[in-house]
Image: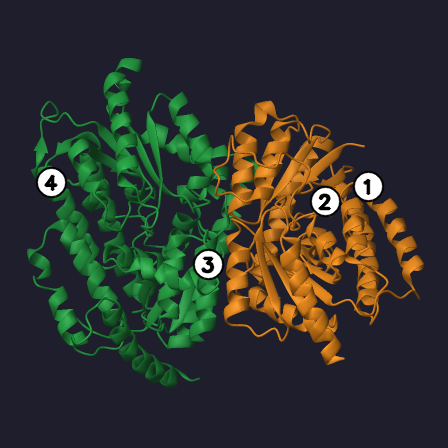
Amino acid sequence: MKKIGWFCAYTPVELIHAAGFLPVGVKSDSGAEHEDVVLGDSICSYVRSCMGGALTGAYDSLSGVVIAHSCECMRRLADGWGYRQEEIKPRMLHLIDVPKVVTDSSIAFFAGGIKHMKETLEEQVGPITEDALKNAIETYATTRMHFAKIDTLRKKEAPAVTGKEVAALIEKSFEIPRESFNSLLENFIQDKEGETGDESAPRIMLIGGPGNSSLIPTIETVGGLCVVEHMCTGLRLFAGERVPHEDPCHELAALYLKKAPCPRMLHDKAREAIEEIQAMVKDYRVDGVVYYSMKFCANMQMQYALLKNDIPLDVPVKVLEGDISSEVNAREVQSFIKRLKKRRKKNR
Amino acid sequence: MNREQVIKENTEQRKIQIENLLCAKGLEGISPKDAVKMAFPKAFEDLSPSAKRGYLNTEQFFNAYNFNIQGEFEYHHLAWRSLFVPTEIMYAMDLLPFTSEMVASQLAMSGMARERIETAEAHNFSGDICSFMKAVAGGVIENIFPTPDILITSTHLCDPSAKYAELASHHYNRPEFVLDIPYGLYDMSIRGSEKDLKRVEEGVEYVCRQLHEMIDFITEHTGLRLENEKLRQVIRWTNKARAWLEEGNDVTLHERTAAKKGVRELDYAANLMQTWGTERIVDVYKSRCIDYKASVEPKSKGTQPRIVWFHLRPYFKTPLMNYLDEKIDLCGSQINFAYWEPLDLADPIRAISRRTVLHPAFSSITARTAIAIDEIPDDTDGIIAYYPKSCRHFHGGSIMENETFKKAGIPILTIDGDCVDDRGEDFPIVKTRVDRFMKSILKNPRSAKK
């Protein structure tokens, strides 16, 4: 099966699926870690890693990539990719712009962008039928439904689901056909229903971007339990409510723009993001928040300044700045978890 | 809060904020009225073109605190603005823009940026956030800026500015309007395929609709209304100013002129300025053009290499710009490029929308460099790009940009610096790089490569 790579949680992957490609999520640890041949060092480590991966053949199995223009760094990834296209095997490069506000007209405009992307894919594979797209939307809706069930399990007092397990599932979702992934989720839910986990572990909400693969293991090794990840490799991938529309591109546009937002989003959606975080702290009975802000991501850095300075979250917030592969300071995390443990014991 | 309450609260707050500003500047004890009078020692008409530009900015700055140039109280409806939000509609509605990035550069010019940046960093603003925004964030925390009536932000170009406005809106408890500008339409307009051109038109329509919503937003929150005839007048001024700007640019690009100095030329920053749509900006660009034409020198007279400047300059005190004035003839600048066609008086909102979405700076490196290669005359010796290290948009693409210009036979020097934060300033090192660049230009002149 031919594959198309994608980088950002705002990429309407249903369309890639409907075109008969396997959408492959480009993972944060799949490329060279410190590419500095094409992009300047003010670009975030995820994008530089992706660029490094492209130049060193890590994505040679892909037929092409779709880059969602979600931020300044992604913009430069598209530039770098196009600039060095002759050295990069995946030939197709499509940049889709994603609005930063959610209004009727931004949804309509984004729907136009999805149609524009559809035309690019059709140049590769021929017409993508409306039925194929509707079926793809259905298949991905099943994934969202399963993740909603997993979330319900994680909200329980002593959840049997760990952050590490969810991270492993999400990693799997990046590489296997969606139908198989849905079966895997179904089995996972069956195994976990009725089970219980550690009741004493402080419940952690993780906020961030593409993250750092050692972050969740570090938190859980030192005694914390991740119960929700408001991240590009977490909630932002699978949250969102489907509102059927006669035009499937419009339906996708609304689904993606209205979902749990990345800090890139502005205006009402940005306010909603903060309210959502506040509500989640209660819903998931969070004891503490770890905000993993990626260096050189202005959107995340601005959001954590807002959270730290002006928004009461009612629980302690630990901000860690780093990149996709930097070592997470286990001692720093441990002392935060220790503090939360005491607080949790006292509160109970 | 109703409009009257907003005006009352803003009036009270701005009185405190001007005092705080003067105090931060080390002018405690001086009354705001006296400070305003001191800022305007000469009449506008008696000033040089560049000083006229400065006068206009300073006048607007004090207006934002409710002072006219006599130092008398005059309430101004104020909109916090990020760069690239079109100002014509604001002026047509009597709404005064207060551009956050420009304020940061003013802080740097008056030696006030560093402390504000340190304030921001002490309040959870990360070290690698754009220094323009950190200076502004520090100023907001210290309460030295005027409380706006509303905020109007654009997603054009940089993430930090739009994102910071969200924080400012929360801080001041004032409503915000966000203009969502699609990226990459300039590239599509160049590619020119049917599907791309269709997308460009969709983008123009999308922004046009938002501009109409912006007008409604302004009216809803300030009571100000848009009169079509006033908008047309404002557009006429913009078109006249643009014509003078372009004519002046032609002189600088093709002639050597004694009147031109690097710093002054860069400070016109024409395609970033908040003064488009004012009557006085016509005078500024007209005077500039006349001044340059009157001082044209024979080409044989000058020996300094002719250099095109990319991006902005350091606004804090540094010997760099004076040194460059001695060494180079700054014959063009990216930020003064009149990239847009005159605006259509018959459909001004759509024309503003088209100008906004087709801004070439909001495009790929390939498109940006292609424009420069086309526009830079053969007798230009090279480019100096001054990029803040924290700028993802410009600095993030500088390696590709360098390679492209070198392939095209245009020498380029990229200075990794900062426009506002002077803490990493190291003039001797930059000077060495400039000297080496000049030496290589003289040794291998561009003309010899052709």
Q: Marks 3 and 4, Cα distance to the nearest angstrom?
A: 37 Å
Q: Secondary structure at mark 2?
A: helix
Determine which residue is flagged by label 3: B162
Residue B123 in which image quadrant? bottom left
Both marks 1 and 2 on one chain: yes
Which amino acid is tagged 3?
A: Ala
Q: Which mark is residue B182?
A: none
Q: Residues within 10 Å of mark 2 (few under 14, many from 20)?
A: many
Q: Secondary structure at mark 4?
A: loop
Which amino acid is tagged 4?
A: Ala
Residue B268 visible in the current orientation: yes
Q: Marks 3 and 2, Cα distance to the nearest angstrom?
A: 30 Å
Q: Upstream in the sequence, badge 1 or badge 2?
A: 2
Q: Position of residue A237 (x, y in %)?
A: 71, 54
Q: Secondary structure at mark 3?
A: helix
Residue A325 in which image quadrant? top right
Both marks 2 and 4 on one chain: no
Q: Position of residue A112 (x, y in %)?
A: 61, 49
Q: Position of residue A37 (x, y in %)?
A: 51, 30
- In the picture, one chain is orange; tell me its letter: A
The colour of chain B is: green
Q: Marks 4 and 1, Cα distance to the nearest angstrom?
A: 66 Å
Q: Residues within 10 Å of mark 1 (few under 14, many from 20)?
A: some
Which amino acid is tagged 2?
A: Leu
Determine which residue is flagged by label 2: A15
